[in-house]
Image: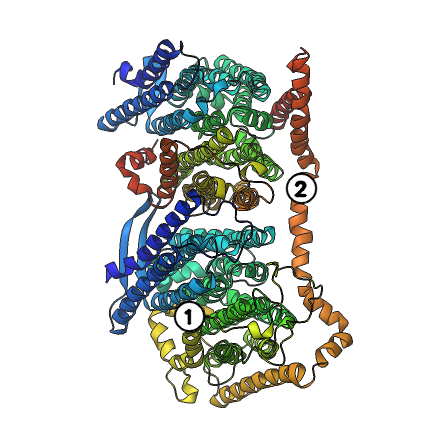
């Protein structure tokens, strides 16, 4: 069993290395030396082998993951592999440890299964791309780091996975690096994530100070012990927070980066610049859910911190609604899905905030399926239309891409919350738990429900615009704002549109099946189910000692049965109303969207400008920082030096040439003046 | 331990230098592969003799250090660890410079001897417990480096670099020497204990002495506002020399400085730490913001190295905060252990990383014969994948992205400071951590820009066709890449030797 677990990342790492070597060898051979944006290329003769190797790695890992899951299903104990000592000092020792328990098993299944499907899909989607092996090298590398993240036995190793997926994501977003727009998007994602990571590190450090170890097992033991819990509940001396709340908030702030919550969600929509399968794998199914995984992993810590939970609820529900509102007006098919992902991640965090970690993870799983399906479906559409991503130039694809249409319909309805599809079951459980939580939970329920209405609407809009009505792509292209469809595509004639190849539709079908039926593994009690998923995760949930429970208070008690029925009924109604409005807008009366825009110009303006958040960051953070570096006093001194040197050197050269002394160059005198000033200043400061 | 075995590394290095001078200085034209090979072999021999000394050191029961040569040399694990990094950097510089030395205007056999002499100065700096010895070491190292900076005699930039370095360095040496003299006046000694005596006396003169020493080091370590020479010198110096300067010099300088601070800690020298905190904060900010505004890769790396010096400065600050009156001395000595251990690891990681970066850059410069502005590395991925991979890993490690060595270094160093912050509760430490974290976020901006440039197509023009390059260089780059990743992910794999050196302080100082 141990070997099996260690093999999961090993296969992926090996795959990444082999692909990287092929890529390097090809670059050496100069095969791609002069490719200038030629995106439809015959492909390299070795691409078939590359594709086979690429899919083999995650498939082998999937096999091992199945072994691990079946071991746990048979009631086996958690698996632990201790590989080697990473860093040792008298105060701090970290081993490289992998562990697999029930939560890890769930994550591993999702990652390797969906990962395999997306690798398969990519073999067709990326066909002919000059960087074929490089792409798969990054994709394997990403999956490798993702498995490290969920298998890590301690927080430092988890952080390596956490950063590693960010790195791979950076590489993949900027995959078509020949254009600056995409490279910038990758950089934005990386930098924003690192802001979150700084909080993560500080939180982890405080945890280490309290526990004395970052081993997750030790941390769990600490939280479950009365002394440990008492220590964490003691006030930390900042803002009247307990230590547990402080740590939980810091870790949550770390998670807002990776899992795209307010205020750090801005990178995710831009990350859509990457290839579509990457969006499906990284920016929907796996990486962005790392924050939820972290919270579920440290559930006892969050349970000890009800005030942090309240913050999580507010932030998550606000993100959920804000992002859903932004998705309403997006015209880029991938952007709709991107904002939708931010919104759905908000739901998962509502589950975390309400203490329903299993519900959060359950939504993570169902979302992985329906959102991956939607993204891959969008990719299939984009593929069919030769890189057209604008919804306004689609339409009527229903008969041309039947499999894509059917699978996206199922996944879309699942996301919109149509019973009894998977998305409905998991979302409903979260909203119910939020309601049951009481207090801020009720607010979260309200915002979440409004967001659900928006969800149903934008899903319906997306499906109707892409597949319903008539094809609008043949009309001459108008000037429009967004600059992502820069592949120089020309309109595709309706008759030339074809369904994507098998390698792309097979993953769609499998994912759609999951989006439809996965709900049954977490079927709620109220509908006669047993919530097997919740029971499966029960061993992962930490049991707080009684003394700690007395302080933080237990759950508010189970809500009434009829309330659950009523809320569920309402949720179904919300879904149908949302879909109905979309139908009305985009099928019955096409003039309605225009009328709405005319009627509420301010609101439309706000929505299309994304409530001004991105502009705010650009104006208030990025630009001032650049200013500071370039234009302020400090910057002037430093850049003044540059100019001084460039000009100075030239003049020095001239003076040397004419036999003058180099000593007359002013800059060295300036430096010495600074040094004298510094010395005098220190003397004055310290002796005065 | 005999005096001879203590001095052996220095003897070997100078012998090697003289041997190269005598054997090869006649041949002044054309490629000459022997000096670099002899230089690398000498550095390796010095390394071995150093490790033998270390072995003797540990075999003496309970002895943490050994003093010899009339108190001139004090060999302990701290110094040996630092000297090891310096010698590895020397060895790698000799190898990485091979290619560059083949260029007509640089192929003078004096390069390697001067490099070896500089290394000898560094060994003296790191393994001496005597202020005069330290000064001698600094001067031997610095004078060699002035020559190396101006080594391309036909190149105005290079000459300008050497001259500026010399002028600023002479000034700093004056400060340093004045500090030693004043300290002698107060305490009547040159050893580390004399510093403690002088500091405990609390007189004005002893304080001035310490401030002058601090200023002298601030120059050597390029701490703001003593940093401005660094950008010009780094840019103008031949690229392999810049790599050497930005790594080995930092290692030797920080080690020597920390030795002085160690002597001061617990003797009432803590009044100095306020100034050190300000220097560190200013250095982090100036270095990182300065790097953000650069258009030349070499200049950017110069500012980046200033920023790193700011981070490293946090370690001596923690050491100085040692409180001898604390009821819990275990916690206090743990702080010293954690911070110095982190500092040595950081220096090792930084040395490997920067050598990789400059090694890749030197190659590009040699092959393409043009400057190293951002455009020069545009589309490097296509033109030269090996150099591109080298630069990529170097940038990630400098930015502190796991699983590279740079990440583990930052993790340990920042962790040590955070640990101290939470023990003492002093705002200064929280401020240091906050600025360190924020500026390392900013640093991502310029490191990623290099990666972006390398991996983007050059829009216009044909990619220049590069002549084939030596397999040895490729192997060297690959070794450095692997070493940086292994050091970041599995330092224990490097075997007991390195980990043994890394844990030099485990027995306590």
- Rendered residue at 57%/61% (across/down): A265
Residue B419: image quadrant is top left
- The residue nearer to you, when weighing B359 against A450, is B359
The residue at which mark 2 appears reads as A628
Left or right of A102? Residue A653 is right
- The residue nearer to you, when weighing A392 against B147, is A392
Residue B355: image quadrant is top left
Can see residue A207? no
* Residue A38, horizontal then vertical, whole percent: 54, 54
Q: Evaluate if marks 1 and 2 touch, with contact meaning CB atoms under 8 Å apart.
A: no
- Rendered residue at 42%/51% (across/down): A209
- Rendered residue at 61%/36% (across/down): B294
Which quadrant does the N terminus of chain A fall into? Answer: bottom left
Query: Compared with residue A551, is residue B97 higher up or lower down, i.e. above or below?
Result: above
* Residue B126, horizontal then vertical, whole percent: 40, 23
Can see residue B375? yes
Residue B485: image quadrant is top left
* Residue B347, horizontal then vertical, whole percent: 43, 34
Residue found at the very far bottom of the displayed protein: A562
Left or right of B374? Residue B401 is left
Query: Compared with residue A567, is residue B410 higher up or lower down, i.e. above or below?
Result: above
- The residue nearer to you, when weighing B31 against B452, is B31
The residue at which mark 1 appears reads as A549
Query: Which chain letter matches label 2?
Result: A
Which quadrant does the C terminus of chain A fall into? Answer: top right
Q: Secondary structure at mark 1?
A: helix
Left or right of A111? Residue B280 is right
* Residue A173, horizontal then vertical, whole percent: 52, 56
């Amino acid at each position: 069993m141990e070997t099996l677990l260690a093999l999961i990342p090993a296969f992926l790492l090996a795959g990444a290395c082999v692909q990287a070597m092929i890529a390097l060898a090809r670059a050496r051979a100069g095969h791609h030396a002069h490719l200038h944006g030629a995106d439809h290329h015959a492909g390299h003769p070795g691409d078939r082998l590359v594709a086979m190797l690429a899919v083999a790695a995650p498939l082998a890992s999937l096999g091992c993951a199945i072994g691990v899951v079946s071991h746990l299903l048979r009631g086996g104990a958690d698996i632990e592999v201790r590989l080697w000592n990473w860093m040792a000092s008298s105060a701090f020792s970290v081993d490289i440890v992998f562990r697999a328990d029930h939560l890890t098993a769930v994550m591993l299944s999702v990652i390797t299964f969906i990962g395999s499907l997306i690798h398969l899909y990519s073999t067709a989607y990326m066909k002919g791309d000059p960087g074929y092996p490089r792409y798969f090298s990054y994709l394997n590398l990403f999956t490798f780091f993702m498995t490290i993240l969920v298998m890590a036995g301690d927080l430092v190793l988890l952080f390596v996975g956490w950063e590693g997926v960010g790195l791979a994501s950076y590489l993949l977003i900027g995959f078509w690096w020949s254009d600056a727009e995409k490279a910038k998007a990758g950089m934005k994602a990386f930098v924003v994530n690192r802001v979150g990571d700084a909080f993560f590190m500080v939180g982890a450090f405080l945890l280490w100070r309290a526990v004395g170890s970052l081993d997750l097992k030790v941390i769990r033991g600490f939280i479950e012990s009365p002394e440990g819990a008492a220590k964490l509940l003691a006030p930390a001396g900042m803002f009247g927070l307990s230590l547990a709340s402080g740590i939980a908030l810091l870790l949550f702030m770390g998670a807002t980066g990776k899992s795209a919550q307010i205020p750090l969600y801005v990178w995710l929509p831009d990350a859509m610049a990457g290839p579509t399968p990457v969006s499906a794998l990284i920016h929907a199914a796996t990486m962005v859910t790392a924050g939820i995984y972290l919270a579920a992993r440290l559930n006892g810590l969050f349970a000890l911190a009800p005030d942090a939970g309240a913050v999580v609820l507010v932030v998550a529900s606000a993100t959920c609604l804000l992002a859903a509102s932004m998705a309403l007006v997006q015209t880029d098919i991938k952007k709709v899905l991107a904002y939708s992902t931010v919104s759905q991640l908000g739901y998962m965090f509502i589950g975390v905030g309400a203490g329903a970690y299993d519900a959060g993870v359950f939504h993570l799983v169902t979302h992985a399926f329906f959102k991956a399906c939607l993204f891959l479906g969008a990719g299939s559409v984009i593929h069919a239309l030769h890189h057209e991503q604008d919804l306004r130039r689609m339409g009527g694809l229903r008969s041309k891409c039947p499999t894509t249409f059917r699978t996206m319909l199922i996944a879309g309805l699942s996301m919109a919350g149509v019973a009894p599809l998977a998305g409905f079951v998991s979302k409903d459980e979260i909203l119910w738990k939020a309601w049951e939580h009481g207090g801020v939970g009720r607010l979260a329920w309200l915002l979440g429900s409004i967001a659900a209405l928006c969800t149903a609407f934008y899903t319906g809009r997306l499906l109707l615009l892409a597949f319903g009505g008539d094809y609008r792509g043949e009309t001459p292209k108008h000037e429009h704002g967004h600059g992502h469809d820069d592949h120089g595509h020309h309109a595709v004639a309706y008759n030339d549109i074809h369904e994507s190849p098998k390698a792309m539709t097979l993953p769609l079908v499998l994912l759609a099946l999951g989006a439809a039926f996965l709900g049954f593994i977490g079927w709620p009690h109220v509908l006669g189910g047993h919530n097997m998923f919740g029971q499966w995760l029960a061993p992962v949930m930490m049991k707080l000692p009684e003394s700690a429970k007395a302080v933080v208070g237990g759950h508010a008690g189970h809500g009434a049965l009829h309330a659950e029925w009523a809320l569920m009924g309402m949720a179904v109604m919300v879904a149908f109303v949302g879909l109905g409005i979309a139908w009305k807008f985009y099928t019955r009366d096409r003039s309605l969207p225009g009328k709405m825009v005319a009627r509420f110009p301010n609101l439309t303006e706000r929505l299309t400008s994304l409530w001004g958040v991105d502009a705010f960051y650009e104006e208030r953070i990025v630009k001032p920082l650049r200013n500071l570096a370039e234009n302020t006093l400090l910057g002037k001194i430093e850049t003044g030096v540059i100019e001084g040197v460039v000009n100075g050197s030239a003049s020095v050269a001239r003076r040397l040439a004419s036999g003058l002394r180099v000593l007359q160059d002013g800059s060295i005198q300036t430096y010495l003046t600074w040094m004298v000033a510094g010395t005098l200043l220190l003397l004055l400061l310290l002796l005065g | 331990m005999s005096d001879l075995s203590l001095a052996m590394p220095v003897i070997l290095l100078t012998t090697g230098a003289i041997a190269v001078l005598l054997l090869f200085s006649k041949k002044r034209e054309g490629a000459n592969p022997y000096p670099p090979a002899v230089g690398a072999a000498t550095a390796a021999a010095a390394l071995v003799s150093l490790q033998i000394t270390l072995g003797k050191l540990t075999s003496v029961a309970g002895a943490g250090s050994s003093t010899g040569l009339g108190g001139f040399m004090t060999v302990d694990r701290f110094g040996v660890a630092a000297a090891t990094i310096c010698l590895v950097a020397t060895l790698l510089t000799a190898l990485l410079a091979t290619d560059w030395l083949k260029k007509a205007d640089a192929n003078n056999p004096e390069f390697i001897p001067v490099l070896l002499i500089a290394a000898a100065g560094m060994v003296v700096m790191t393994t001496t417990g005597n202020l005069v010895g330290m000064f001698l070491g600094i001067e031997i190292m610095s004078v060699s480096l002035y020559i190396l900076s101006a080594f391309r005699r036909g190149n105005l930039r290079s000459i300008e670099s050497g001259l500026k370095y010399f002028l600023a360095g002479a000034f700093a040496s004056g400060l340093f020497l004045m500090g030693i003299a004043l300290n002698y006046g107060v305490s009547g000694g040159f050893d580390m204990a004399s510093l403690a005596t002088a500091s405990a006396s609390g007189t004005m003169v002893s304080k001035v002495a310490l401030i002058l020493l601090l200023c002298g080091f601030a120059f050597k370590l390029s701490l703001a506002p003593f940093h401005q020479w660094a950008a010009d010198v780094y840019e103008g110096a031949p690229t392999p020399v810049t790599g050497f300067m930005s790594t080995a010099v930092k290692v030797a300088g920080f080690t020597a400085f920390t030795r002085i601070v160690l002597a001061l800690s617990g003797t009432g020298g803590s009044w100095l730490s306020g100034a050190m905190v300000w220097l560190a904060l200013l250095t982090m900010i100036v270095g990182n913001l300065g790097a953000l505004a650069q258009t030349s890769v070499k200049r950017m790396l110069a500012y980046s190295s200033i920023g790193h010096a700011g981070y490293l400065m946090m370690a001596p600050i923690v050491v100085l905060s040692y409180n001898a009156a604390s009821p819990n001395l275990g916690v206090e000595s743990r702080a010293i252990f954690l911070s110095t251990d982190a500092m040595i690891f950081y220096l090792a990681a930084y040395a490997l990383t920067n050598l990789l970066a400059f090694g890749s850059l030197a190659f590009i410069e040699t092959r393409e014969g043009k400057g190293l502005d951002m455009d020069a590395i545009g589309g490097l991925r296509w033109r030269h994948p090996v150099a591109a991979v080298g630069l990529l890993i170097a940038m990630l490690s400098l930015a502190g992205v796991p699983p590279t060595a740079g990440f583990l270094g930052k993790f340990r160093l920042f962790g040590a400071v955070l640990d101290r912050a939470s023990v003492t509760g002093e705002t200064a430490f929280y401020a240091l951590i906050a600025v360190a974290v924020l500026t390392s976020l900013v640093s991502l901006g310029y490191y990623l820009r290099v990666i972006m440039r390398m991996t983007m197509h050059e829009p216009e023009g044909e990619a220049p066709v590069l002549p084939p390059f030596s397999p040895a260089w490729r192997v060297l780059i690959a070794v450095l890449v692997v070493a940086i990743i292994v050091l970041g992910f599995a330092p224990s794999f490097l075997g007991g030797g390195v980990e043994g050196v890394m844990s030099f302080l485990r027995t306590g100082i």
